[in-house]
Image (spheres, grey):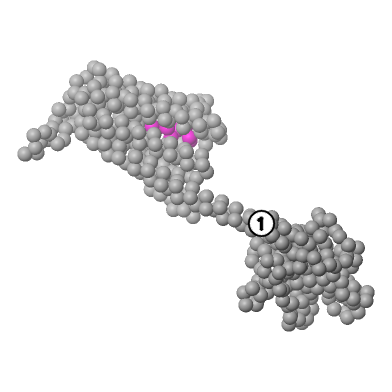
Amino acid sequence: MAAITLRDRLQQGIYVIINPFVKSLIRIGLTPNAVTTIGLLLNIGVAVIFIFGAEKSNRGDLSFVGWGGALVLFAGLFDMLDGQVARIGNMSSTFGALYDSVLDRYSELIMFLGICYYLVSHHYFLSSLFAFIALMGSMMVSYTRARAEGLGVECKGGLMQRPERVITIGVVAIACGITGHYVGGDYKVYVPGISFHVFETMSIFTIPITIMAFMTNITAINRLNDAKKALNLKDEQQKNAFQVKKVVVISAFILASIVGFGEVTTSSAQVDTNNPSSVKFPTPKGIKNQLFYLQRDPNTNTIICELNLDKNGVIVKDEPIKVYWMRYGDKGEKKELNYIQRKFAYGIEAQELGNDKYKLSFVSYKKFPMYLMKSETDQKYHVYVTANNKKIQLDRIFVRIEGGTFWVPNVKYVELTGKNPKNNASLIERIKI
């Protein structure tokens, strides 16, 4: 479980305080969108205070800064209230979330408009530049999150999110106004040897905004970097999923080609010597309970289908067939099927029919039934199939591939080798593709 951050704890503590007020708003019929609209109107009031202060006050009068900061905090409260009204009042909606997001951006733009107007009017040109940069960063923090979430990744981190920005501006503006009232708006600090002042009362407001100018843009860049990592990971996962799907499709295609009797044109049972394979295939030997094996161009690696017996020599009814590789192309190593091969390609499903008889089918192609049962002649288990209207005691399945591409191999024929159950005569049935 993810650890609860200090920011989340503070937010939960604030909710405890404001929830009674939220319930009062719900009782009088205010909707979340109405609360959001009130927040916008209050931020318009913030801009009006700063602009009025720019026009009606002198440089040393910082009272308008203080009152503007107080209204910033009050307007910011409504930024929290709308979400709580939606949650507690069960009035959440998709459009409400969009409306809140859009009006929050307008509120912040209008607030910074008033601040920049005030700073320019009173000749704080450098500070007004940083205020504008802070505005740019604030917009990019919000935009980066919105764009990342639109691409399917969460992007909420950073030190200068909207609540932090609102609280910072509101608190420092109030502090600047109070200090100006008691110390004076023209108070300055000089350092010997430096011809200009290094600090003045207005710096209480402008220095934090300068810091915010850097921090908001750093937050936006960090969010962009986090989103890049998340999107790269997502792309990699999608790529891996595509590769898995590709392997599944290829395996299923090849196996369907091998056993796809329902989708091919069958020829007569006569065997000819056309299309001989250029590969010399080994015959598996020394496998005690082997039922049949499967081989195909272009390599000698062989699928073995073996009777699955327990330690007492009794067939395992839940899984009567063991399927694995004999990798003759890799020094004859015995190797289990991997998950994809077992679940989507060469694995075999079995259905017990009673009387020691099982219906078998490859997981990738269930239209070709095979039957596992005991022979009347030797009382041993064998697998039986029907091809070209002939019943075969199956020993081998072989698919001949000649050319084509990796995705679409040119399958020339499928060959079934085994015995006639009635007279034990050898049978080879070839199915042309």
Nearest to the observer: residue 181 or residue 312: 312
356 on left or right of 7: right
Mark 1 is surrounded, within 10 Å at the Cα level, by few (under 14), some (14 to 19) or many (20 or more) other residues, namely: few
Task: Kindly report the secondary structure that dominates the magenta region of the rendered protein.
Answer: helix
In the image, what residue occupies the spot 79% across and 78% down? 314
The reply to whether residue 169 is in sight is no
Magenta includes 361? no
Position of residue 421 relative to residue 346, above or below, is: below
> Quadrant location of the C terminus?
bottom right
Which residues lie in the magenta part?
Answer: 76-84
118 on left or right of 382: left
Where residue 321 sits in the image (x, y, percent)? 76, 71
Where residue 264 sits in the image (x, y, percent)? 81, 56
**What residue did someone put label 1 on?**
405
32 on left or right of 124: right
Amino acid type of the residue that numbered disc 1 sits on in the rendered structure? Thr
In the image, what residue occupies the spot 38% across and 41% down? 220
Position of residue 227 relative to residue 118, above or below, is: below
In the image, what residue occupies the spot 35% across and 36% down? 137
Residue lying farthest front?
A: 274
Nearest to the observer: residue 184 or residue 241: 241
Residue 245 lies in what quarter of the image?
A: bottom right
Where residue 331 sits in the image (x, y, percent)? 62, 77
